[in-house]
Amino acid sequence: MPYPVLEMGGTHVTAALVDLAAGTVHGEPARESLSPQGSADEVLGGLARAASRIGAPRDARWGVAVPGPFAYETGVALFEGVGKFDALYGVDVGAALRALIRPEPAALRFVNDADAFGLGEYAAGAAAGHQRAVCLTLGSGVGSAFLSDGMPVNDGPAVPPEGSTHRLFVDGRPLEDTVSRRAIRAAYARAAGCGGDEVPDVRAIAARAREGDRVAGDVLDHAFRSLGGAIAPWLDRFAASVLVVGGSIAGSWDRVAGPLREGLADAGAPEVRLAPAEQPERAPLLGAARWAALGSVGREPDPAVRL
């Protein structure tokens, strides 16, 4: 039986049916726009519309990938002061979706979106076969998943607080002030002396760097060397054998890999395989399905699914 999943992003939600055994997504996923400043009813309605379009089996167990802050075990949203979905603060999203999705789910298993990405890359991507893997997503922020035998590790001395690299610092400032879409664009604007609509997006900055734009190259080199320096100690503590990088910024992998590798080496990182995501679009969907198959924390996997 395929597992129905939802992946909630900052401006959209994707719903799909996932065949875990084959590592594939059935048919065309359903996608609905979400307004980060929308009311609770508007946001929940968008989630439910996408979910109800994919023809999920009756009484299915759903996997739902959601960004934080969120109480994943209880399904209660904790978005506050993060610029998106504040209207959901304190809402029992699980109960609301069970009432809205048709056919009604038997259960909903919530998982952090970065952990879902890592679980997907472990199931059918660049982290497959690695006992200890670190997976990063680079975009509006720096998401992370620390996986041990395919399970997220979110506490303990071997990982950053809550297993989240966005809690790391570079030169006394949060990592995302150096490595994020916002930070890279701001750094380019300062260095190039431009502003407003003149500031290119990261993909365009990478294109300029390829064409020999020294300012663009220096900005990207600084950002990804800094990322390497910040993550290096945690690769060592976690004893990771692979570092997988996904997210929209990783689409410019040729401009990411070199300075990231240099930053890792300069910080004395252990030898690890550095790889771009092999399932950049599907990994969160596969990971959410795998989480649904695993069931709640501490429970045995679904015996019908080979994980």
Image (cartoon, helix red, strand yellow):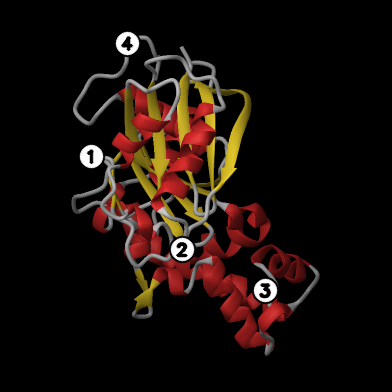
Mark 2 residue type = Gly
Residue 279, percent across and down? 57, 37
Which residue in the structure is indicated by mark 3? Answer: 217
Which residue in the structure is indicated by mark 4? Answer: 303
Q: Left of 233 or right of it: where is 265? A: right
Near-viewer residue (166 or 2): 2
Task: Please tell me which of labels 2 and 3 falls first in the chain.
Answer: 3
Residue at (68, 75) in percent of width and height: 216
| One can see residue 143 in this view | yes
Label ID, residue 228 = 2
Mark 3 residue type = Gly
Mark 4 residue type = Pro
The kind of secondary structure element at disc 2 is helix
Which residue in the structure is indicated by mark 1? Answer: 74
Task: Please tell me which of labels 3 and 1 falls first in the chain.
Answer: 1
The kind of secondary structure element at disc 4 is loop
Residue at (66, 85) in percent of width and height: 195
Q: Mark 2 and 3 residues: CB-CB less than 8 Å, in contact?
A: no
Task: Please tell me which of labels 1 and 4 falls first in the chain.
Answer: 1
Work out whether 160 lies above or below 110. Answer: below
Tell me the mark number nearer the camera, choosing from 3 and 4: 4
Quarter of the image with the C terminus in it: top left
